[in-house]
Structures are given as structure tokens and as C-alpha cells.
Amino acid sequence: AHRTTVQAGVSLFDFLEPAGPGPVADFAAKWTSGLYGVGFSSMHQQSLARHFDALGATYVEEKGHLYLAPDATHGMPTVITPHVPRAAVGHIRCLYEVTNPVADAAATTAHYTELFGLDERRFSHIESRLYGYRGSLTLFNPPAYLDRVEVTETFGGGAMDRFYQRRGPGLYMCYIETDDVAALAGRLRARGARFTDSEDRPPETGLFIHPSAIEGMLMGVSRTNYAWVWSGRPDRAGAEADAYAAH
């Protein structure tokens, strides 16, 4: 694929365009556009490569990046890159979550725990009757960071469940943080971009950007630190957290 990389906060987004036969071309032919894969950074790249070797996990190393084979994850194409500290730019603070609906959330969570060398004691259970899912937040390094995979089983016929029934295991959406949700909403309105407020949280704390606004990618937005409300540390979310009703 041809790749164009842009920085958003301290995170990076890659825009991929097929450059010949391969998994990106297959994805584009099947789905046109959308959230293709995820990249995680590591300060222990070579140790992680040795860990993959010990597990028998197949990967390709290219230009210092570790690309896991498709069967290593559950519909979640994954690349591991060396960690590079960078100063934040723009209105987004960071990308902190991808959502991976699967057939068996507990089994997938256990698999990712072993594959990525995570500590399951730091994970947080998550369930939403409103949106129709249950599963785990595989928090990598709380409370320093919110970064994680949200592994879910879906039910009830809602949007996430329809996605899973149509596509099977894959990447459903991603989540970003910003200091000013209202300002972001204003910029979206000015551009005629579709979005909706969260149905069960104050509008100033989050919203969802419709896939039609960003090339087929569903993006959740939360105000800085507010996601700790449902991530096991509501004390880090600010005084308004007490007003949030569990859903």
C-alpha cells in the first residue's frame, strides 16, 4: 500500500491506498473504505519479537515494524512500531482505543493477554445494554494511560451487533480524546459532517462521528480523562463523573 501518515495529538493515523495485490487491496475491494488495522508502539520492540517467536506467532519484520500475521489476531490487522515520544499537535490529544467485536470475548481477551504480554489484573469489564455489547477493556498501562483494545461480544441488533453479523470479527471503531468536545462539534457542523451526541452522557463529554464524515470510519470522541468513568478509575474523570449513570 501507499501510506500517508498524519499526526493527531501524540498519535498517528495512516491513510492506505492499494499499490498492488495484497491485504489492503482485498479490504478496499470488499469494503471500499473504513478502519483497516491498528498500530501499537512498544519501548521493547526486540523483546516483543522474541516473545512472538517463543509463542510461535507469525509476523513479518519490515523497516523495524512487526506486522502480525492475520491469524494472530481476531480480525484486527496489527503492527507493532518502536515507541517514539512526540509533542502533541492539533485539537486531538490521542487515539486511545479500538473496538474489536469477536465471537468469544473472554477467549480473545486471554489470547491478547498472552500475545502482547499484558496484565489482566489491570483490565476493566465493560457492558452496555444500550449499545448491545459486553467484554473487556485490555488496559495496557493504567492509570498512566487509557490505551487499550475493547474486546466485545455483541447482542440485541444494535449498530455494533449488525456490524459483527455482517462482517464477523474485525475493527468496529476507534476512540479519541479532546479537551473541548463542543469546539469539535462546532467544526463538524461547519463542515456539514454527520455526528451524534452520546445517548446517555452529557453532550460536552463526548460524541460519535459518523462513518460518512471520515471515509467509512466510526470514531468516538470523549473529553480528556472522562473515559475513566467506564474504565475502572472514575476518580480520574472529574467531578461530573458522579452524574454519569451506568448503562
Image (cartoon, helix red, strand yellow):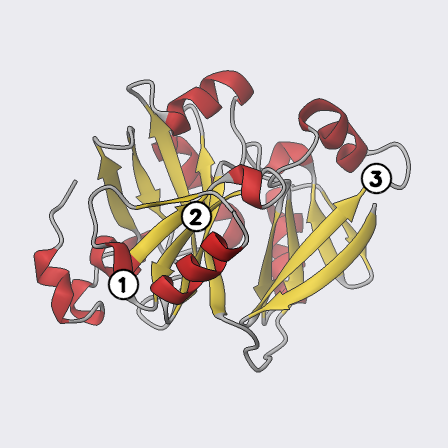
Q: How many marks?
A: 3
Q: Who's the residue at 67% across and 49% down the image? A: 53
Helix, strand or loop status at disc 3: loop
Quickly name the residue at label 3.
18
Who comes first in sequence, dot 3 or dot 1?
A: 3
Residue 119 seen in this snapshot: yes
Mark 2 closeness class: few <14, some 14–19, many ≥20 residues within 10 Å: some
The amino acid beneath tag 1 is Tyr
* Tag in front: 2 or 3: 3
Q: Residue furthest right?
A: 20
Density class for disc 1 (Cα within 10 Å; few <14, some 14-19, many ≥20) is many
Gap in angstroms between the C-alphas marked 2 and 1: 25 Å
Identity of the residue drawn at 49% across and 71% down: 91
Marks 2/3: CA–CA distance: 32 Å
Position in image of residue 64 (x %, y %): 77, 63
Quarter holding the N terminus is top right
Locate residue 119 relative to residue 30 in the image: left or right.
Answer: left
For label 2, the residue is 113
The amino acid type of the residue labelled 3 equals Pro
Dot 3 crowding, Cα within 10 Å, few <14, some 14–19, many 20+: some
Q: Disc 2 or 3, which lies upstream in sequence? A: 3
Is there CB contact under 8 Å for labels 2 and 1? no
The residue pinned by badge 1 equals 226
Q: Is residue 179 above or below residue 230?
A: below
